[in-house]
Amino acid sequence: MDLKNKFLEMYGGELRDIHEYFAPGRVNLIGEHIDYNGGKVFPCALDLGTWAAVSLRDDGQVAFASLNLPLQVQVSLSDMGYQEKDGWANYAKGVIQEFQARGCRLKGMNILVYGTIPNGSGLSSSASLEVLTAVALNDLFQCNFSMVEMVQMCQHAENTYVGVNCGIMDQFAVGMGREAQAILLDCNTLDYQYAPLRLGDARLVIGNTKKRRGLADSKYNERRSECETALQQLQRELSISSLCELTPAEFEVHQALIQDETCRRRARHAVYENQRVLEAVQALEAGNIQRFGQLMNESHDSLRDLYEVTGPELDTMVEEARAVQGTLGSRMTGAGFGGCTVSIVRADAVDAFIEQVGQRYEQRTGLKPEFYVAQVGKGAGPVYPPAAYQVEELIAY
Ligand code: ADP
Ligand code: MG
């Protein structure tokens, strides 16, 4: 895919005036539904992502086009408010508005984006598009925001402008990702540390169930309030400010304080999932991928049985994944009820995995899944011209 040539076909202009940017998608390896319970998440950036080619224009207009979606939009810089008719471009417009609100003086632009992240599948194509826009603006107009500031601005745009109540994990992983590293992140304090993802001869295989996450939003709010109820009841005797401050042993001592059996199960998931995250990072550090895989399995089972956010499609795909010789671990990733699974699979078993899980999943659900063998990619930033292109330019000038 030569994005720059597509850009010239669409907008005209000169090759040398085009600036190119990239932002990855992300997958959460373990630590699900605990970001809002004071727990830690463990995502990494992927080599799936979104690219943008951008050139400046002098008339204060911003044109948006995507090679993935037909809708093209053109709006004035002074008119960046949310408009339903502007569809996908709102994700970029929201970020432009964030920059303007902080006093950045922008110019008009032609923007063409292209993405390889399946939309709406829990790999954060929306955060990718937002952070992509932010790194482009920061570079083109020398706004000097740090990556963490941009990550916060993008989350703010998605919360208040697009109206999706997401936490900060997505934008953080997209912006701060590093090749071959995952990020242990506390979403409340933004304390983070990188952990090398040494998978040895294993690969990260992402399976897209193709089931839309229809229920995810309403159930998300329900789970949050169930956890709040559990916390309030524990707080009658304990001075804690979030569920994940408890160790599993402490939880066992005090769990009877939670009156409602459903709320107790939700809290149990949060406490044990947080423990699994910490153990998973230790297992990786010790090079124990086998244990990392087991913890992924336990995470899924807890999300299925205690937290009840999986659903038949995710459960079927995980079950079939685990039945393949060479799978070290498999779980749902993201909010649940659809979207993707993530599995760790020995490299020599990846082809068999894709064939076998693909066939059996389709037989059992009637949905045709997709698989991506992902590399752990780097975070968002400018794309520097490849060597051949630089040589050509040197000769031309
Ligand atoms: P997810 O973030 O899980 O992929 P969302 O529903 O949050 O799902 O975001 C998907 C939306 O992001 C798409 O419907 C579209 O509006 C926008 N989007 C993502 N990638 C692109 C792209 N390459 N081109 C245009 N719009 C995109
Ligand atoms: Mg999203």
Image (cartoon, grey):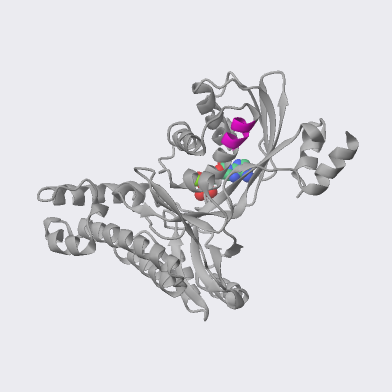
Q: Residue furthest bottom?
A: 325
In this rendering, would 88 be left or right of 308? right
Residue appearing at x 32%, y 47% in the figure? 36
* Image vertical order of residue 241 relative to residue 377, above or below: above
* Residue 138 magenta-highlighted: yes
Residue 333 place in picture, x, y as percent = 45, 59
In this rendered view, identify the residue nearer to me: 93 or 215: 93
* Image vertical order of residue 376 relative to residue 14, above or below: below
In this rendering, would 292 be left or right of 372? left
Chief SS of the magenta region: helix
- Tag count: 0
In this rendered view, identify the residue nearer to me: 282 or 237: 282
Is residue 87 in view? no
Residue 231 place in picture, x, y as percent = 20, 49
Q: Residue furthest right?
A: 395
* Image vertical order of residue 216 relative to residue 355, above or below: above
Residue 241 place in picture, x, y as percent = 22, 45
Q: Splitting the image into 4 quarters, where does residue 137 fall?
A: top right
Image quarter of the C terminus? top right
In this rendered view, identify the residue nearer to me: 84 or 171: 171
Ligand 1 placement by image quarter: top right
Q: Find the magenta span and give its range.
A: 133-139
